[in-house]
Image (spheres, rainbow, N blue to C red):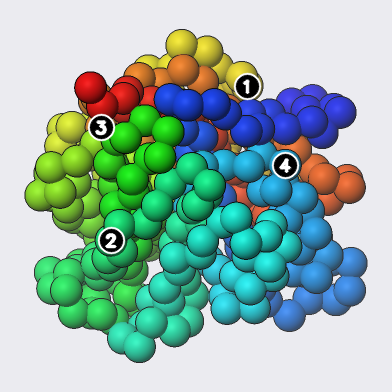
Amino acid sequence: MHRQADDRPIIGPVAAPDLHCMTLNLRRSVPRPAGHPDSWEHRRDAVVALVASEAPTVLAVQEALRPQAVDLATGIGSRWEALLLGRDRYGDGEAVGLLVDTERCSVVERRSWTMSRTPLRPGSRSWATAFPRHAVGAVLDDHATGRRFLALATHLDVASPWARLRSAQLLGRIVAQSGLPAVVMADYNAPAGSAPWRALAEAGVPDTWGRASRHETAELGTYAAYREPRADKPRIDGVLATEDADVSRVAVSTRRPGGVWPSDHLAVHAVLSFGTTA
């Protein structure tokens, strides 16, 4: 049994200079009978309770349909600014994005890129993807430390290994071109240590898991599909950060607020610091 039995926050609020970075695939809402584990109406309060109690500095979400995004943003309160964008050419449809704690960080700039050969063309597709994939980023100023950093959220393609690798390489270039410390949070749809993760590590954005001073949980498979998570399954969700990040804690959340799995994916957490300005 891997679950946090008392359902207390596994990380919770952090103090400067630490940043609490969290990623969660919300699992898009699809029609289900009432009470079905995959029903958004069944899971909604558990998602809100999980996020509100963990109080991340920056949260990345994937598979957020507009009503889900509204439910989450409304449920956790106005302290978090939602920066979400759908994947089609008009910014509609299934979204990825960030929720930023505005008591800690200011949004200086927001950007989006399509994961394709034409990253500035919304809705474009390349590399044998069935539908568009994209990334949403924000340049953030940390009020507490004076540091400026880049946060990116994305969801790599589920079917095409080529697309996952090329997308990871594109993310590495985006980080390099920013010239900023950065954190990249995603459902990578590939096991930790596989080609997309290695491509980002080669670009100077390695996984935080092996760099952490403390592991709050075992490394578990993050696509649990509403079942007990297993250590022999792959972690496909993660928080990656540039090499200048000092990583203190990481965790895979098995919390079930109110006895309900929030999603078919498990949230991944990293507590890290980019230091303070002189």
Farthest bottom residue?
90
| Residues packed near mark 2 inside 10 Å, few (<14), some (14 to 19) or many (20 plus) | few
Residue type at mark 2 is Glu
- Tell me the amino acid under the disc marked 1: Thr
Residues under numbered marks 2 and 4 in contact, where contact means CB atoms less than 8 Å apart: no
Give 264 or 151, whichever is nearer the viewer: 151
Any mark on residue 242, and which? 3
Q: Which residue is mark 2?
A: 109
Secondary structure of the residue carrying numbered label 4: helix
Say whether disc 3 or disc 2 marks the residue closer to the N-terminus: 2
- Residue for point 51% across, 61% down: 81
Compare marks 1 and 4 and give the one earlier in the sequence.
Answer: 4
Tell me the mark number nearer the camera, choosing from 3 and 2: 2
Label 2 vs label 4, nearer the camera: 2
Question: Is there a contact, CB below 8 Å, between mark 3 and mark 2?
Answer: no
**What is the crowding at mark 4: few (fewer than 14 residues within 10 Å), some, or many (at least 20)?**
some
Q: Quadrant of residue 210?
A: top left
Q: Earlier in the sequence, mark 2 or mark 4?
A: 4
Residue 127 appears at what percent x and percent y?
20, 67
**Residue position marked by numbered label 1 in the rendering:** 217
Q: Is residue 250 visible to us here?
A: no
Image quarter in which the C terminus is found: top left
Q: Nearer the viewer, residue 187 or 175?
A: 175
* Disc 1 to disc 2, C-alpha distance: 34 Å
Identified at 54% across, 26% down, the residue is: 15
**Type of amino acid at the residue the image marks with label 4:** Ser
Look at 80% across and 70% down and name the residue there: 41
* Alpha-carbon span between mark 1 and mark 4: 18 Å
Given residues 55 and 119, the one toward you in this image is 55
Q: Nearer the viewer, mark 1 or mark 4?
A: 4
Residue bearing mark 4: 53
Q: Earlier in the sequence, mark 1 or mark 2?
A: 2
